[in-house]
Image (tube, grey):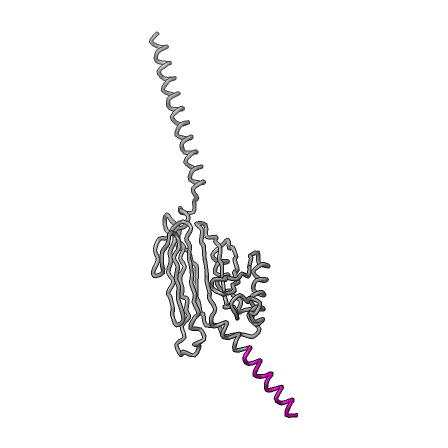
Amino acid sequence: MCILRACRARAVILLSLASLAAVMLTGCMRVQRALVIYGNGSGSYTLTIGFPEPAPGDSSGISSKIEVPMDAFGAHVQQEGGTYRRYTNTSQNYVYWAYTSSFSSLADGNGLLQEDPRQYDPNHLPVLFKDTLKISKVVGSSTTLYQVTGTISLADPLGNNTSWKDATESVAITMADGISTHSGGTLTGNTVTYAIAYKQTATISVTGNGSATTTGVDNSTQATQARFIAVGVLLALAVILGGVGGWLLRGALKRS
């Protein structure tokens, strides 16, 4: 009986250590988001999440408690028409999962921003990052602007998650037609990047140019209307000139 109790105690200890290891790995995760928005409101979104290898060069040792939700989320992304892949960064000794999806509307893009592998985690491992990102459209008299606002956070106000001390997160927002304004972050070309570490929070605010707009009439319609107007003016001029020519001709015949 004592031997059986000892075995059970040892099993409980090993299980606890395994769970702790999984949590520790989760705490060291690296989260990267890349959002691209085009002038017509479509775009692409890539979510990349990485975990340290249990031992350098040994990616096979990643806990199944991590692999299961990561791959399940990948299957979901593929089912929705996106892609995902798992790869190892040997220089960092990190294993990454990258999920890429395209969207044709801002509503679809906002839906993608709300999804991540936590929805497929039956163990509900604690995850510190708390993000709220939203894409919106502002239509002006002559242009359409797209805005990305919200926050990314690895805040730990109670200091209870010290295993997260190596966690990092970044968001790269690209406006294909150019950046109009932004607050915070680092601007490089048409991309604004925000990066945070443990206990940090960043406020996201990026506005980018969209396609030119008119009051309910697109450029092709305007061009067609302009052509009709030009043809009409030419026809009117032809009628007037014809009338004047006829009048002059009749006058000349009378005098002769």
Whether the magenta-drawn stretch holds residue 16 is answered as yes
Quadrant of the rendered image containing residue 1: bottom right
Image quarter in which the C terminus is found: top left
Whether the magenta-drawn stretch holds residue 247 is answered as no
Q: In this rendering, is residue 190 above or below 230?
A: below
Task: Pick the residue in front: 91 or 131.
Answer: 91
Task: Pick the residue in front: 88 or 234.
Answer: 88
Location of residue 141 in the rendering, given as x and y in whole percent from the top left corner: 36, 49
Q: How many marks?
A: 0
What's drawn in magenta, residue-wise? Answer: 1-18
Location of residue 9 in the rendering, given as x and y in whole percent from the top left corner: 59, 87
Location of residue 206 in the rendering, given as x and y in whole percent from the top left corner: 38, 58
Quadrant of the rendered image containing residue 60: bottom right
Q: What's the residue at 36%, 20% (across, down)?
A: 244
Considering the whole magenta stretch, tell me its main secondary structure: helix
Q: Find the residue positioned furthest to the top.
A: 256
Q: Is residue 67 left or right of residue 233?
A: right
Task: Pick the residue in front: 20 or 161.
Answer: 20
Q: What's the residue at 39%, 76% (across, down)?
A: 157
Q: In this rendering, is residue 218 above or below 104?
A: above
